[in-house]
Image: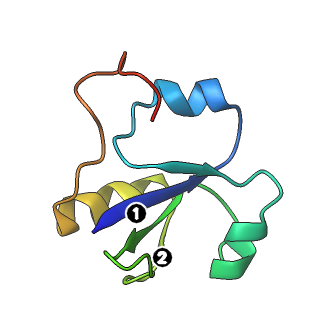
Amino acid sequence: TRLLVISGGAIGVNQELGFASPVVLDDDHAIGQAFGVTGTPAAVLIGSRGTVISDVARGGVAVRAYVDRCHVPEMTPFPDRPDP
């Protein structure tokens, strides 16, 4: 199970956040529209078969609360790690 973060904005700004989870940039809002989300950040859990297995967490506070509730890593302690 992985947390997938959907965000917008510049790649560098999102990299500075240090998310351990993959971040998909959605500047044209196509992904958000598919999930019924109008703003970013948002997050979903992706199961081992690549399917969405959760509701969508919407907004920064909700994403962080979701991370805490689901016990998935949100941030890496190594912000200078190489890009995946």
Report whether residue 43 is seen.
yes
Distance between the Cα atoms at labels 1 and 2? 9 Å
Res 31 label? none
- The image shows residue 53, relative to residue 32, as above or below, that is below
Q: Which mark is residue 62?
A: 1
The kind of secondary structure element at disc 2 is: loop
Residue 68: where, in percent of width, then height?
Answer: 20, 59
Q: Amino acid at mark 2?
A: Val
Q: Is residue 70 left or right of residue 56?
A: left
Question: Which quadrant would the C terminus be assigned to in this image?
Answer: top left
Q: Is residue 33 left or right of residue 73?
A: right
Quadrant location of the N terminus in the rendered image: bottom left
The residue that mark 2 highlights is: 56
Q: In the displayed structure, would residue 76 be above or below residue 66?
A: above
Q: Which is nearer the N-term, disc 1 or disc 2?
A: 2
Q: Position of residue 59 (x, y in %)?
A: 51, 59
- Picture colour scheme: rainbow
Q: Residues within 10 Å of mark 2 (few under 14, many from 20)?
A: some
Q: Is residue 36 visible to us here?
A: no
Callout 1: 10 Å neighbours few (<14), some, many (20+)?
Answer: some
Is 14 on the left-hand or right-hand side of 77?
A: right
Circle count: 2
**Outermost residue to the top:** 80
